[in-house]
Amino acid sequence: MRTIRLTESADYDPDRVVAIGLLAGEHSNVRMIRLSPGQTLPPHTHATSDLFLYAVEGHGELDTADGVATFEAGMLAQYAGHEELRVANRSTTGLTLLAFLAPAFPPEQSPSAP
């Protein structure tokens, strides 16, 4: 068993999106994403990994096939691996997200053969 405190993890960086691994298991992992005001997460997918995205603090926008959706603290979103994730922080405060992925993403790289 392992515990962590988000407040002791990476802080916001106004020059770049912060995306760090927090915990990893055999079949899943959790990443923290921090978007400073005005930042946008580059659009991407997660291959065969399901994504559950939880907004811990702040509020932002999810750009979806159905249009832009508000995404704020306390909300949870689910994405299939093939669905493109597009998140923007258009507010004046930071946006912290937890991304729960199963199977783990990115997949661990196997060692290269000599």
Image (tube, rainbow, N blue to C red):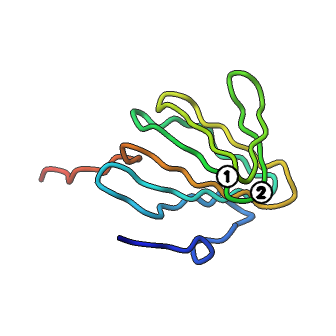
The image quarter in which residue 24 lies:
bottom left
Q: Horizontal and vertical percent for residue 109?
A: 28, 50
- Rate crowding at label 1 as few (under 14), some (14 to 19) or many (20 or more) other CA atoms within 10 Å: many
Q: Position of residue 60 (x, y in %)?
A: 77, 47
Q: Is residue 37 above or below residue 52?
A: below
Residue 40 lies, with reference to residue 66, above or below; the image says: below
**Residue closer to the observer: 101 or 74:** 74
Q: Residue at x 77, y 57 (%)?
A: 58
Q: Which residue is mark 1?
A: 55
Above or below, 32 against 42 in this view is below
* Residue at point 39%, 72% (across, down): 2
- Amino acid type, label 2: Gly
Question: What residue do we see at 54% from left, 50% from top?
Answer: 99
Circle 1: element type: strand
Gap in angstroms between the C-alphas marked 2 and 1: 7 Å
> Is 53 situated left or right of 61 in this image?
left
Amino acid at pointer 1? Ala
Q: Does the residue at mark 2 contact the one at mark 1 (Cβ under 8 Å)?
A: yes
Q: Which mark is residue 100?
A: none
> Horizontal placement of 12 versus 81: left or right?
right
Sort mark 2 into few (<14), some (14-19) or many (20+) by Cα contacts within 10 Å. Answer: many
Identify the image quadrant of the N terminus.
bottom left
Dot label at residue 58: 2
